[in-house]
Image: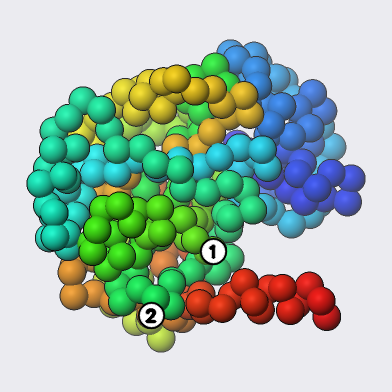
């Protein structure tokens, strides 16, 4: 059993139980927002006895429309080394890897997040864009981890490498965040030590890059990351925290438009997205589309 957000005729953001390829309504919890407001024990009890009718519709990213997506950086040794390779100021990454306080940054909201099968973007003003395959945790308002999903934290590597202060532009732009396919409840997910992560990029039907790692290689615990995220702020509608990547393409690799990025996480599922280039004048094109 997994949780999905479905755009149905009755509810544009219906929370559903996903079982054997079908979606079932949860009468007491019409939305993911409602589910993330209550304690984990109460959520589990409702889900285990829920027996709602089947619903039909388009599956959306597994994110509440009021929620935010945050990211953690430099949480794996490979991530630290990659950041140091591409940066003109490598010491900052060494220091944050060793520090108690993790690197945490705002990544996206619902409007800026795409789901499984949707298109992710690479900036037209970036010479090197890479996927960052990550396990993402879904956290409720009570600071409890209620489930796991997959995040492709697409990153404009050459922009971040030019100056760490460019991180917001490198991390948050149209099409830079993919989540999916669904949420696996925490009590049904594999143990962290058994949660493996594998990624590949396919170009014209041929695999041009692949790598794998495991969540057990994370240098900080999930609870540690959540604890810092909730310091001095609240998330009344829950939050998704992407926990960082342990697999990054080599420095000379360039992701191209038309590439397909596939991320598999054991016990969680598969997230797959095609890459498209986001033009510099995308806002002008969007405004013109609104006028027509």
Report the coloring of the rendering.
rainbow
Q: Is 212 displayed left or right of 88 in the figure? A: right
| Badge 2: residue crowd in 10 Å (few <14, some 14–19, many ≥20) | some
Answer whether residue 114 is visible to the viewer in this image.
yes
Residue at 18% in and 68% down: 250
Which image quadrant is residue 3 in? Answer: top right
The foreground one among 280 and 119 is 280
Residue at 21% in and 25% down: 100
The foreground one among 77 and 228 is 228
In the rendering, at what x and y percent does residue 92 appear?
A: 16, 44
Can you tell which mark lies on residue 174? 1
Residue at 23% in and 44% down: 74
The relative height of residue 261 versus residue 258 in the rendered view (above or below) is: above
Q: Which residue of the protein is positioned furthest toward the right in this rendering?
A: 10
Q: Is 170 displayed left or right of 86 in the figure? A: right
| Badge 1: residue crowd in 10 Å (few <14, some 14–19, many ≥20) | some
Residue at 29% in and 44% down: 73
Residue that label 2 marks:
256
The relative height of residue 44 versus residue 259 in the rendered view (above or below) is: above
Can you tell which mark lies on residue 166? none
Answer whether residue 202 is visible to the viewer in this image.
no
The foreground one among 265 and 278 is 278
């Amino acid at each position: 059993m997994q949780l999905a957000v479905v755009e149905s005729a009755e509810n544009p953001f219906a929370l559903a139980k996903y079982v054997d390829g079908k979606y079932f309504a949860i009468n007491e919890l019409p939305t993911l927002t409602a589910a993330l407001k209550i304690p984990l024990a109460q959520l589990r009890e409702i889900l285990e006895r829920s027996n709602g009718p089947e619903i039909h519709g388009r599956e959306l990213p597994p994110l509440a429309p009021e929620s935010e997506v945050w990211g953690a950086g430099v949480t794996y040794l490979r991530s630290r080394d990659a950041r140091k390779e591409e940066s003109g100021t490598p010491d900052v990454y060494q220091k944050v890897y060793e520090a108690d306080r993790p690197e945490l940054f705002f990544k996206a909201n619902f409007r800026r997040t795409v789901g499984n099968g949707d298109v992710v973007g690479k900036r037209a003003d970036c010479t090197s864009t890479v996927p960052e395959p990550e396990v993402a945790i879904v956290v409720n308002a009570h600071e409890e981890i209620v489930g796991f999903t997959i995040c492709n934290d697409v990153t404009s590597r050459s922009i971040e490498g030019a100056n760490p202060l460019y991180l917001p532009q490198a991390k948050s732009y149209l099409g830079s965040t993919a989540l999916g396919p669904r949420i696996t409840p925490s009590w049904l997910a594999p143990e962290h030590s058994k949660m493996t992560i594998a990624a590949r990029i396919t170009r014209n039907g041929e695999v041009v890059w692949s790598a794998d790692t495991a969540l057990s290689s994370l240098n900080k615990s999930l609870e540690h990351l959540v604890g810092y995220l909730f310091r001095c702020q609240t998330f009344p509608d829950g939050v998704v925290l992407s926990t960082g990547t342990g697999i990054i393409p080599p420095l000379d690799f360039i992701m191209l438009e038309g590439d397909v990025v596939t991320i598999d996480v054991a016990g969680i599922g598969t997230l797959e997205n095609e890459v498209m280039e986001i033009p510099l004048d995308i806002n002008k094109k969007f405004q013109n589309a609104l006028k027509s």
